[in-house]
Image (cartoon, rainbow, N blue to C red):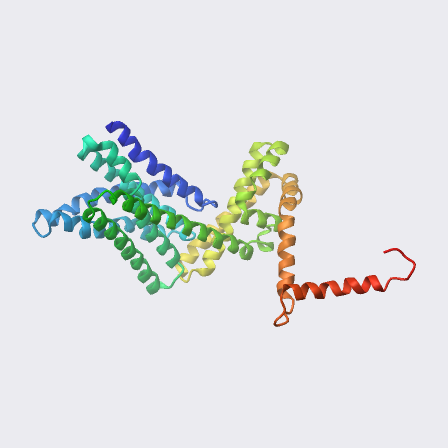
Amino acid sequence: MIVVACLIAIAIPAGVLYGIYRLNLYKTGEFKVVMFCSAAGVAAYIIAALINPLPRRLGWIDYNTMVRFLAPVVEETLKALILFYIVRRPKFTYFVDGAVYGFAVGIAFAVIENYEYIFGHPSAAMAVAVNRVVSTNLMHAAACATVGIVMGWARSQKTFPRIAFSLGGVLLAMALHMGFNNLVTRVNNGWLLVYAVLVGGGAAGLIALMIRRGFKDEQSWMQDTLGIDERVEAQEVAAVQNISKVDEVYKRVAVRFGPETAEKIKKLLIVQAHLGIQKKSAEKTPDEKLRAGIDVEIARLRREMEAARREIGSYAMAYLRYTHLEEMFSVYAALGLKLQELAAQPKNPGMNVYDRLGQRMVPLAENKTDKPAGKNS
C-alpha cells in the first residue's frame, strides 16, 4: 500500500502541474525552467525541515504554534526566493510565466512533504496520500503561484513599487498558508477534508483563471507589436492570436508538405508569439538594464523567426498565409471590421436598435417606390 500511496503522492501533483503548464498556450514558460523551479521547491523543503523545528526544540513555541504560524512564514519565504531571481531574467515575459513557475516550486515542495507524512503514518498511507494531493498540495502550489503572479505583474513597475508589490505577494501567500494550517489544526470533525479541498482546489482554480486572463492580455499585445516591422502578415498575426484554433491548419499542411514542415510552421507561430510578447514587455519595463537584456532576447527571436521562414520555404509560407489562414480568419476579420464601423457611427441619443433598423429600412422602401411603372420588382 505504501508503494501505491507514494505513486499517488507524486503522479497526481505532477499531472496537475502538467495541466497548468499546458494552459500557457504560447509556451513562454520554458520546460527546463519549470524543472529548475521544481528542484528549488525540493531544496526549499529540505531547508524548511531544518529551520521549522528549531524554535520548538529551544522551548520558544509549541507544536501548534509552529505549524499554524512559523511554518507558513518560513516555507513561503524559501519558496519565493527562487522567484525573485526568475522574474528578473530577460526570457521571463508576463505573470503567466510567474504562475507556472510558482506552481512548480510549490507542488514540488508539497510532493516531498507528502513522503514525510506517508512514511510517518504507514498504516494510513493511502488515506494520507489521497487527502494531501487534493488539498494541501494544491494550497502549497497555489500560494507560491500567487507570489509568481504578483512578481510577474510587478516586474513592469519602478523599483520601489516592484519591491513593495513583490513583498505583498509573499505576505499574501503566507496569509493563505496560515489560514489553511489553522483550519486543518483546529477543525476535528468530518467536514475537515471538505473544507481543505475547497480551500486548496479553489485557490488552484483561481490561479488557472489568472493564467487565462494573462493569456488574453498577451493576445491583445500581438496586435500592437506584430506587423509590417517584423514582416508578419495579418493572417499570421490572427493565427498567433488564435493559436488554439489552428490545429486543423497544421493537419492540412502536413498532408501537402509533410509533418516536418507542419512542425516548423507551429514553431514559427510560437516564436512570433514570443516576439510580440517580448516587444510589449520591453515597452512596459522601466528598468534600463532589464530592457537591454530583453532587447537581446528580441534580437534572438527575430533571427530564429527568419531561420524558421527559410526552413519552411516561400511556397509553403504563401500556401499557409493565403489559403488556410486567410480562409480560417477572413470571417472573423470581416466581422471585426463591421463591428468597428458600427461603433464609429454617430449615435443619436435615445434611439434603440429598432429605431436604427427603421432608419435603415426607409431607403429600401424609397428605392422600390421610385422604380418605373410597368416593371416587375
Residue 163 in the image: above or below residue 201:
below
Viewer-closest of 253 and 8? 8
Of the 4 image quadrants, the one containing the N terminus is top left
Percent across and percent down for residue 65 are 15, 51
Q: Can you tell which quarter of the image residue 259 is in?
A: top right
Of the 4 image quadrants, the one containing the C terminus is bottom right
Percent across and percent down for residue 215 are 47, 51
Percent across and percent down for residue 100 are 38, 46
Percent across and percent down for residue 33 are 37, 43
Left or right: 160, with 341 as reference point: left
- Of all residues shown, which one is farthest toward the bottom? 349
Name the residue rendered at 52%, 55% in the picture: 220
Name the residue rendered at 21%, 44% in the picture: 189
Residue 30 in the image: above or below residue 361:
above
- Of all residues shown, which one is farthest toward the right? 374
Name the residue rendered at 46%, 57% in the picture: 282
Left or right: 340, with 376 as reference point: left
Left or right: 121, with 8 as reference point: left
Q: Can you tell which quarter of the image residue 229 is in?
A: bottom right
Viewer-closest of 132 and 31? 132
Left or right: 101, with 184 as reference point: right
Numbered circles on residues, count: 0
Residue 334 in the image: above or below residue 42:
below
Q: Is residue 304 visible?
A: no
